[in-house]
Image (tube, rainbow, N blue to C red):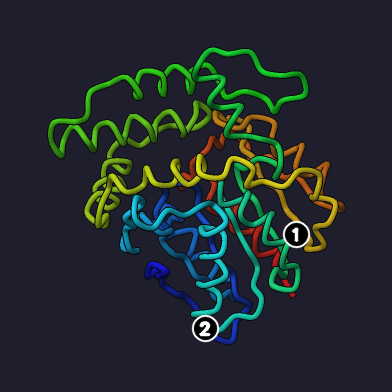
Amino acid sequence: MQPNIWSEEFGAATDAPIVLVMGSMSQGVLWPDEFVGRLTAGGRRVIRYDHRDTGRSDPVDFEKEPYTWDDIKNDVLRVMDAHGLESAHLVCHSAGGLLGQLIAVERPERVRTLTVIGSSPLGGGEGGVIMRALMGEPQPEGSLPEPDPEFVAFYQRLFTAPPPGDRREQIDRMIAEQRVLHGTGLPFDEDAARRLQERILDRARDLAAVANHRRAAMARPDFEPVGVLDRVKAPTLVIEGTHEPAKPGHGAIIADLIPGARLLMVEGMGHTLPPEVHEELAEAVLAHTAE
């Protein structure tokens, strides 16, 4: 049985549709309300959703009903179907960018344009690069660039730390993670981060269920086909922050591999979407999706 996927829609039904695809283990509300509002004000119909095992979407009993990232990818198409969309502009963040790239390869008729933000090239083995960095293992020749040392050190500590004892400790840990992903190029607003993480915690039907996304990746390590990005026909915009801590330099590689893709470097941005970059990001997406 397929899990129920929570989604919400903004803007006029007659406007060009944008589906926002967030990254691994991430709720749809990580697409900031202000950014969404700028897109709808620009004449777009915007849909954001929670991946399975996140937010208000159904948690899955992975032991009884295991799944892979192919299923998470197919959820994007299920969301489109539920909103009556034969095709849409896909705007994707982080691991959501892998989903968008794969859909653009496999189902080109469903992708009007593709925008990937803070992502890695499909087939690049990004997950392996990060795990080797965390384990202190050498990277094979030709591997994608490693995360920043601060990113690596934080997650090494996180993976060995005891679980949080209460709600406050949980939120403090989530804020600390957001701070690392935010990068060092822009001021970090801790009060705003606390409000966001409280919202995420309050929306989660089962916060621990997000770990199933890692299990899904391990269930099929060969999820990403290699050498297929030259098949992407959708006009593609690649966006990366100049202070990207998790996937530095990956955006340029994507832009090189997809024919005709354009690369936009956003000054100061890390791996999150803070208010300082909303206007620039929205204007770029509106221009790219103009029909």
Say which amino acid is labelled 2: Ala
- Element type at marker 1? helix
The residue that appears at 49% across and 29% down in the rendered structure is 183
Task: Indicate which disc, 1 or 2, sits on the residue closer to the N terminus.
Answer: 2
Q: Which mark is residue 105?
A: 1
- Pick the quarter of the image with the C terminus: bottom right
38 relative to 246, above or below: below
Q: Is residue 10 visible?
A: yes
Which mark identifies residue 178?
Answer: none
- Amino acid type at image mark 1: Val
Label 2: few (<14), some or many (≥20) within 10 Å? some
Q: Is residue 227 left or right of residue 18?
A: right
Residue 233 at x, y percent in the picture: 82, 62
Please say whether residue 284 is visible from this viewpoint.
Answer: no
Left or right, residue 37 beside residue 103: left
Q: Where 63 sits versus 165, above or below?
A: below
Residue reaching furthest left? 166
User: Residue placed at 44% from the left, 46% from the top?
Assistant: 213
Quadrant the N terminus occupies: bottom left
At x 72% / y 45%, what residue is drawn?
264
User: Label 2: which residue?
Assistant: 12
